[in-house]
Image (tube, helix red, strand yellow):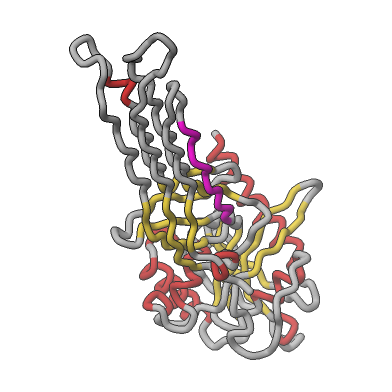
Amino acid sequence: MFIDEARIYVRAGDGGNGCVSFRHEKFVPRGGPDGGDGGDGGDVIFVVNNNMTTLIDFKYRQHYYAGAGKPGQGAKKYGHSGEDVIIPVPLGTIARDERTGRIIADLSEHDDRIVITRGGKGGKGNAQFATSTNQAPRYAEQGTSGEERTVLLELKLIADVGLVGFPNAGKSTLLSRVSSAHPKIADYPFTTLQPNLGIVRYDELKSYVMADIPGIIEGAHEGKGLGIRFLRHIERTKVLLFLIECTVEDPEDNYRKLLDELELYSGALLEKPRFVALTKTDVMPHDKPVEYPGFAGAHGTFAISAVRGDGITELVHRLGRAVDEISHHAAG
């Protein structure tokens, strides 16, 4: 099951109280203060786990509590700090504070580790308050409370190439052809009900990740169909590949409608390099060549058949070069 949204409550540990204590030594009837400090409360920390691909774990557990700090003791003994709670999340997870809507973490790097709520500070023991004018303080600090919040988790897949198209345009068939992914494929709309990822290999020792999302329909930016929930999964991609059936009456109109939906959702999507693949050329009559309409802004147009393999090698390599160019540019 693919789960890409979750809501959890997290609470860091309270700090331990400082201790009021005095030395009790033989022949020293009025020993000085020796109360130790309380320990700090534990933090709640998100850590990227590269083996996780969904937020399904949070369906079964929604509450997380870090350990409280222990109180200080006599003889200036400090209390132990509370244990941190480490919460593994998939790469690409965004965490928002439910109350403010503010993004508090964007875990988009493989080694990301971010403190979500901080533990309270331990209180000072009375030994810390001794002065020349107050040599026997009879008070200590209480520990402060740990932070708490309700967190909304949202997963955005991280892929190099995102497939964009209307339902039944052939996205899942293409992904199954060029990678080892096995998405559900059938000849009716909305076969794909969840995003699928596949590793596409090209050249020697080179590969990139391709993401197939459920088909877009008009009004998707408003949440129609599977809408916004899945449009976000192409926000992190480097390159977009638009898939349009070669048999539709007006391929350019299909292309414009797809562009409109992406722009209404996020104009930044149109700044990504994009290519167009005219799909299902195997159903075209042999005596009728595939026409290549002018797709404004596209870096290239390909005619392909994922069933027969026509044009697949050329497409895979061109997308690979595009991903390489962007990666090298970002690294430079």
Nearest the viewer among 116 and 247 is 116
Nearest the viewer among 144 and 277 is 144
- Bounds of the magenta segment: 79-89
Give left or right: position of 261 versus 108.
Answer: left
Give left or right: position of 294 versus 172.
Answer: left
Q: Horizontal and vertical percent for residue 301?
A: 60, 66
For the C terminus, the quadrant is: top right
Examine the structure image and report whether residue 320 is included in the region drawn in magenta.
no
Residue appearing at x 34%, y 14% in the figure: 29
Q: Horizontal and vertical percent for residue 133?
A: 18, 12
Q: Horizontal and vertical percent for residue 318?
A: 67, 56
Examine the structure image and report whether residue 81 is included in the region drawn in magenta.
yes
Q: Quadrant of residue 24?
A: top left
Give left or right: position of 319 versus 41.
Answer: right
Vertical position of residue 110 compared to residue 89: above or below: above
Residue appearing at x 45%, y 77% in the figure: 227
